[in-house]
Amino acid sequence: MSGAPPRTLQQLWPELTLVAFGVMLRVMMHVSFDVRWSYDFDDHFAYIEHLAHAWSWMPLAESRAAYHPPLYYAIAALCMRAGAGVQALGWISIASGCARLMLILWGLLRWLAEQRIARAAALAIAAVLPASLHTDGMVTNEALNGLVSTAAILLAAEIFAAKEGRARLVRAAAFGAVLGVALWIKLSALVILGAVGIVGAAVALAAARRGDRGRARSFAAALAVALATCAVVSGPWFVHTRAAHGRFVLSGFDGADAHRLAGTQDKPYLLRRPLRFYLGFSPRIFAFPYVPVGLAPHAEFPTQLFASTFADYYNFAFGPYPESLDAPLRANLKPLRPEVLTLSRIAIAGGALVALATLAGFVGCALAAWRRRDAALAVLIAIPALAVAGQLHFAVKYPIDAEGLVKGAYLQFAAAPLCATFGLAVAWLWRRRRMRVLAALAFAGTAALAVYDVGCRIL
């Protein structure tokens, strides 16, 4: 069911209501989540304290987070200098998550102007996705990275949607500048540059083969401008890492965790993980959506990614811990409340419905991009695909399962297009009367996630 593009705030009430609900959940994180349970809190906070007191590059050996670019940590350090306490630092992520929801709304209005059901479904999952909400309350660089990277993704699509000439070059320059800022937060944003480069090069090459030299030159010039602008903005960080550490790109295993690599790099890359790691999925995750399921006795990438996206798979206090830390029910060696386990089972069941719809929408968009030769759509779906491939590569290159390398939180910077593919799948199903029950099930999946979010906030 499609409608005319909304022109007033009154016409946008469903979308704004969903955004407001997502904002409310994120604000509630301030009072219902202790930021000291953020992923790798001690290491992130050590980086912040170092900048707050020394305002100099942090030695790699002093923190597992020291390999990250410093922008998020500098902002947090300035907040500390201004008198912010530890819990107040979570507002950086909360504000970033709320702003990201507004950006997603803008993108949906731009690209799905006549598809209200698709917009509503996309905003619903963006608002309640547990991995996103959890990250948006943490003291970590992920939420700020998600905000700036989402802006870069929207600008990336504009490069391919623009008419040839100055408009395309201006949008390419804007994209490069925003992406350069993202690279000062976290280097995962390189995935976005890779997707733009691959799709842009493919479009330029196809145009050249057809003899359309003007279009080929236009895309080549846009890519050059984007790359140059990005290099100007982010270049100082890469120059620093090269001069200080002999490499342009660092990981956590180049510093404090280097000792954990012992014996892991001896095997050839393709032999470091068995086939089960790539394809295995344990149904036990629906009964117990926590470590060690999917991790022991066999590590399974799909199980870990699925569970850490739709539930607090690593048990990092998304739902409150029991008063007695000696409680018998445990997950990832930490206590677990029975009520939280019940809520997480609801979430993981709903997450399965959402994941299936999202995957179906992704495949449909990929086919549509190919049939229509739609470069803007192609780059939007290429970004999350490359992000998943990048996380898989990292987990294969460093097969150290105890470190929790596979997390849905790490993919939130590239997740905005997947929200749209979920919305498009729901809208497609709803337009076909015989399939409306499937659309209703997909919406029920988001409702289950909302129950999990709200339940964990008010327990």
Image (cartoon, rainbow, N blue to C red):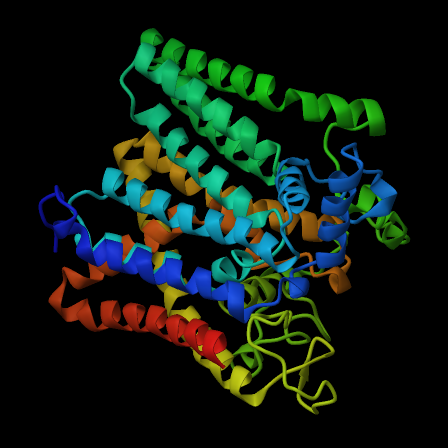
Picture coordinates of residue 135 (x, y %)? 55, 57
Residue at left offset 68%, top offset 48%:
394
Left/right placement of residue 328 relative to residue 244 reads left
Residue at left offset 86%, top offset 54%:
260
Picture coordinates of residue 221 (x, y %)? 44, 11
Left/right placement of residue 423 relative to residue 217 reads left
* Residue 441 vertical placement versus 90 (above, below): below
Quadrant into which the N terminus falls: bottom left
Residue at left offset 42%, top offset 46%:
100
For the view shown, which residue lies furthest in the bottom direction?
Answer: 328
Picture coordinates of residue 362 (x, y %)? 37, 51
Residue at left offset 68%, top offset 35%:
69
In the rendered image, which quarter is residue 341 located in? bottom right
* Residue 66 vertical placement versus 35 (above, below): above
Picture coordinates of residue 202 (x, y %)? 43, 24
In the rendered image, which quarter is residue 22 located in? bottom left
Q: Nearer the viewer, residue 282 or 417?
A: 417
Q: Nearer the viewer, residue 121 or 196?
A: 121
Count how many numbered circles sit on residues in the image: 0
Q: Is residue 296 visible?
A: yes
For the view shown, which residue lies furthest in the left direction?
Answer: 4
Left/right placement of residue 190 relative to residue 348 reads right
Q: Nearer the viewer, residue 169 or 208?
A: 169
Q: Is residue 209 visible?
A: no
For the view shown, which residue lies furthest in the front direction?
Answer: 83
